[in-house]
């Protein structure tokens, strides 16, 4: 079986896996990194949203071979030790999460948006397609706006 | 008015409960002056939550609360946390009563505890209502013992001591709970007086979730995140609901695929165990299987709608000498679709078994799995894991049972994941329903109000959470249908003085996988009524808010309606294609009003742009959590009213993912939401389900006012706008 090396949350890792194994399962089943969640497996619900080389990607439809040699950041790698990322901080302030299952993906999508667009409009926030079945969208929106403030100051 | 025969069975069922003495709370009804009074409905006297409280009462004091040697306290909660915030709310109750910082209170979900009988079911918006007193009593008892221990240690009367911030304080002494807990456990302390406090310090304060940090850092563990042995497992399922395996043609070839560990046939399909879920999925997709028919192969939306229309009971009042208004509504099947799909871990050995899953009825799960495996009940350990959403779904333990069967067949521990497609097609649904309403009126008053609900049978096979009532729900005589009648009659009531009011349910049994969906019958039944109320108001040339005000029964109800009318600027001018809509709902001793604005310039893609919600929960334990529940209810209503449903085609839902089942996204959600929690007015009422029905009414009414089109079938925009996945 081929082996693939890549960086996850700053650490270099190597996995034995078939080339077409979705990266989600390499992360979860091979490396025990469970922050990215399975919700659909076809890049629709976006619960697995993580970052590759600083941009949002969906490991449920990205073969492990494609992430070889690249830098992956999951929700576990977003905070700097005990110091939360401003988006995580805003999420706490707004008490966004209900069941919490989609929130790693929501947060990683929001971080990616704020990197591209430091002061997003409502229409730009609307473009985030991550499903929240608990229906926390309004608090997600408020938290993104709050995070934008925190990141400016 | 004829009394439905089922009422008799309903009463017989209720008197089996320990006491009926709480059933007399009817003195709060104050008739609107001019309206024709409506006598209280069963749900006014005794609602489903009351029954659950009564059923749980004999075991209510079996709650376990410990004061630990680190000075913190641990509450073992016999309920399931699935996002509704009960671990936070109960931690607040403990912290308040025990004078302990909230951060030092831990709430863990109890394993299945069969001795609790009816008291380990999470449903009916019942958790806080049922544990409010027992949890406070337990915490008060713990505090009293800590004080007694300190009094004995210092040789002073307990009455001279007080508690603060996790310590007992006297005039010259201070000892933390950590220092006192061993002494407090001594049996020679003598009796202590236990009186829960009347003043709250934390209860009623907006508080963030106790698990919020774990959730935003990815550390919150759901079932398949647990670090336990077990092979990733997925199941190939039949092309129609309840189909069974006739023959597997290529089991050996699939077993030889990379990463595949085993292939076993169980009642529900063919399971593939593998090294990773990716490989389990590839294996199940590669299987070639012949299938036996399912149980509803000849059914589709048309056949089911015809059955429902035929099943709707006739009206009692003929439209002879009075003016009248009729309306009919249809609601589609709806998937629960929690984002964490159906999952479980099972480790079945020859002499024992251990199960992990998000379970709202763990006792009946334990009992059923034990019987299935041929093990004594106490040899099956069932752990309740915090769940990634439920909305009623996790009342059923089908994943746990299936995982147990697979583990037994394969002789290995398994981690079972349902694919999203399977979760939507073979999982549970809210039953489709048809509604017929009629009101008669004269001189501006409503004289009669009739609602006939015909619904595909809702499965209550989980009973009250243990095997006795679960078995009763399966009995051929009475069985699930009388259980359903009990639930309907103890949840559905009209908040209005509309004269003689009858709301009747008739269910069509179809062997599909249905189940309670947040607010059970109320979302459709009360949602339809709120739409009908608007149409009635229009017919009588009354403003929808003024009309409701005139016929609501109590000042408390009118207060939430007034709140949204004022805060939402009811009646303000809006551009063409925009409109406001309002809805009201009362359930489980709580009430709410919802006012929305809709942009329906594009009728195929209307958007709710603003929402104002007010709710009276009696005693709001955690206002921030309650606001979250109302926000969720609003999003559920936006989804199911406008876009989200399941089409049934030849015995299977067509929808298989969120690209097809159109639950709302950020772009469908309002950019302005304001929620008002009314000040305390009593004891805690139900919370988790309250928000949906009022919002359904408000959204449909706004759509009707914006477009001039009366909505009759829900979701309103419901095309098959996708290529279904292969069966």
Image (cartoon, rainbow, N blue to C red):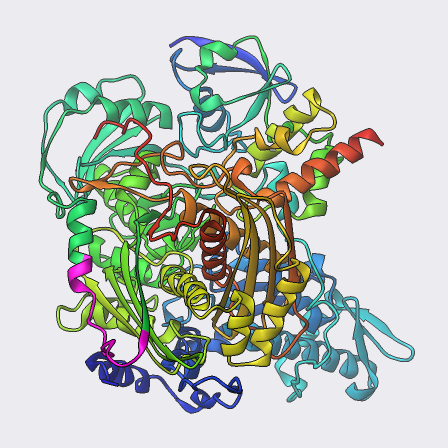
- Asked whether, in this view, residue B384 is left or right of residue B273, the answer is right
Quarter of the image where the N terminus of chain A is located: top left
Which region of the structure is painted magenta? B308-323
Q: Is residue A142 left or right of residue A58?
A: right
* Front residue (pair A31, B289): B289
Horizontal arrangement in the rendering, residue B289 relative to residue B680 (left or right): left
Q: On screen, A87 above or below B208?
A: above
Q: Quadrant of the C terminus of chain A?
A: top right
Whether the magenta-drawn stretch holds residue B508 is answered as: no
Q: Which residue is painted at 52% across and 9% down in the image? A: A68
Position of residue A38 measured from the top left corner of the image (x, y, whole percent): 44, 32
* B668 and B262: which is toward the camera: B668
Residue at 56% from the left image edge and 71% from the top image edge: B546
Residue B319 sits inside the magenta stretch: yes
- Does any portion of residue B281 appear in the rendered image? yes
Taking the spot 40% from the left edge, 75% from the top edge, the residue there is B493
Spot occupied by residue B368 in the image (x, y as percentages of width and height): 25, 59
Q: Quadrant of residue A125?
A: top right
């Amino acid at each position: 079986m081929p082996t693939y090396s890549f960086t996850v949350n700053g650490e270099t890792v190597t996995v034995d896996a078939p080339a077409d194994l979705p990266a989600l399962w390499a992360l979860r089943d091979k490396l025990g990194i469970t922050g990215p969640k399975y919700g659909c497996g076809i890049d629709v619900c976006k619960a697995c949203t993580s970052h590759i080389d600083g941009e949002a990607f969906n490991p449920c439809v990205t073969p492990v071979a494609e992430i070889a040699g690249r830098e992956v950041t999951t929700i576990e790698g977003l905070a700097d030790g005990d110091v939360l990322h401003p988006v995580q901080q805003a999420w706490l302030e707004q008490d966004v999460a209900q069941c919490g299952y989609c929130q790693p993906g929501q947060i990683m999508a929001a971080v990616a948006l704020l990197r591209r667009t430091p002061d997003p409009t409502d229409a730009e926030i609307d473009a985030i397609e991550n499903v929240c079945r608990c229906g926390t969208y309004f608090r997600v929106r408020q938290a993104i706006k709050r995070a934008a403030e925190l990141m400016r100051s | 008015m004829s009394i439905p025969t089922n009422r008799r069975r309903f009463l017989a069922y209720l008197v089996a409960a320990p006491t009926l003495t709480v059933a007399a709370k009817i003195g709060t009804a104050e008739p609107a002056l001019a309206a024709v009074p409506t006598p209280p409905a069963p749900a006014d006297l005794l609602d489903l939550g009351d029954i659950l409280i009564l059923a749980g009462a004999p075991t209510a004091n079996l709650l376990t609360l410990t004061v630990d040697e680190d000075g913190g306290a641990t509450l073992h909660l016999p309920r399931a946390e699935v996002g509704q915030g009960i671990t936070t709310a109960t931690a607040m109750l403990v912290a308040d009563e025990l004078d302990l910082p909230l951060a030092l209170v831990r709430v863990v979900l109890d394993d299945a505890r069969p001795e609790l009988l009816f008291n380990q079911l999470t449903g009916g918006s019942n958790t806080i209502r049922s544990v409010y007193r027992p949890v406070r009593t337990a915490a008060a008892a713990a505090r009293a013992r800590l004080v007694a221990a300190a009094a004995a240690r210092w040789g002073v009367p307990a009455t001279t001591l007080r508690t603060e911030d996790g310590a007992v304080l006297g005039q010259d002494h201070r000892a933390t709970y950590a220092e006192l807990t061993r002494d407090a456990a001594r049996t020679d302390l003598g009796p202590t007086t236990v009186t829960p406090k009347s003043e709250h310090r934390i209860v009623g304060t907006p508080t963030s979730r106790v698990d919020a940090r774990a959730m935003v850092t990815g550390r919150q563990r759901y079932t398949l995140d647990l670090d336990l042995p077990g092979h990733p497992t997925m199941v190939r399922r039949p092309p129609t609901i309840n189909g069974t395996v006739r023959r597997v043609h290529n089991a050996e070839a699939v077993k030889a695929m990379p990463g595949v560990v085993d292939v076993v046939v169980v009642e529900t399909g063919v399971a593939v165990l593998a090294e990773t879920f990716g490989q389990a999925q590839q294996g199940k997709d590669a299987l070639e299987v012949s299938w036996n028919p399912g149980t509803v192969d000849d059914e589709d939306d048309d056949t089911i709608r015809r059955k429902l229309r035929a099943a709707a009971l006739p009206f009692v009042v003929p439209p002879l000498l009075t003016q009248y208004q009729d309306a009919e509504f249809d609601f589609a099947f709806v998937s629960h679709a929690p984002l964490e799909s159906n999952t479980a871990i099972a480790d079945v050995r020859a002499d024992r078994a251990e199960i992990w899953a998000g379970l709202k009825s763990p006792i009946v799960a334990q009992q059923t799995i034990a019987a299935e495996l041929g093990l004594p009940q106490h040899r099956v350990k069932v752990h309740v894991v915090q769940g990634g959403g439920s909305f009623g779904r996790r009342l059923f333990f089908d994943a746990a049972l299936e995982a147990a069967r697979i583990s037994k067949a394969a002789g290995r521990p398994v981690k079972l994941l349902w694919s999203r497609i399977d979760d939507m097609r073979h999982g549970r649904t809210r039953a489709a329903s048809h509604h017929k309403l009629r009101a008669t009126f004269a001189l501006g008053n409503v004289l009669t109000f009739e609602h006939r609900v015909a619904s595909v049978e809702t499965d209550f096979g989980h009973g009250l959470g243990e095997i006795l009532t679960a078995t009763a729900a399966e009995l051929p005589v009475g069985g699930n249908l009388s259980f359903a009648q009990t639930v309907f009659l103890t949840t559905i009531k009209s908040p209005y003085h509309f004269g003689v009011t009858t709301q009747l349910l008739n269910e069509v049994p179809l062997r599909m996988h249905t189940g309670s969906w947040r607010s059970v019958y109320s979302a459709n039944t009360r949602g339809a009524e709120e739409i009908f109320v608007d149409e009635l108001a229009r017919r009588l040339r009354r403003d929808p808010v003024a009309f409701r005000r005139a016929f609501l029964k109590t000042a408390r109800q009118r207060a939430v309606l007034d709140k949204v009318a004022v805060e939402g600027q009811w009646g303000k001018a809006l551009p063409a294609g925009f409109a406001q809509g309002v809805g009201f709902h009362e359930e489980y001793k709580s009430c709410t009003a919802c006012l929305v604005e809709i942009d329906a310039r594009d009728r195929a893609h209307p958007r709710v742009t603003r929402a104002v919600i007010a709710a009276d929960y009696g005693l709001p334990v955690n206002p921030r959590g309650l606001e979250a529940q109302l926000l969720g209810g609003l999003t559920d209503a936006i989804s199911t009213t406008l876009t989200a449903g399941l089409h049934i085609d030849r015995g299977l839902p067509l929808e298989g993912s969120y690209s097809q089942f159109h639950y709302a996204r950020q772009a469908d959600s309002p950019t302005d939401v304001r929620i008002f929690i009314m000040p305390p007015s009593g004891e805690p009422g139900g919370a988790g389900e309250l928000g949906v029905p009022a919002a359904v009414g408000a959204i449909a009414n706004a759509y009707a006012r914006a477009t001039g089109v009366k909505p009759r079938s829900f979701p309103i925009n419901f095309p098959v706008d996708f290529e279904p996945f292969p069966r």
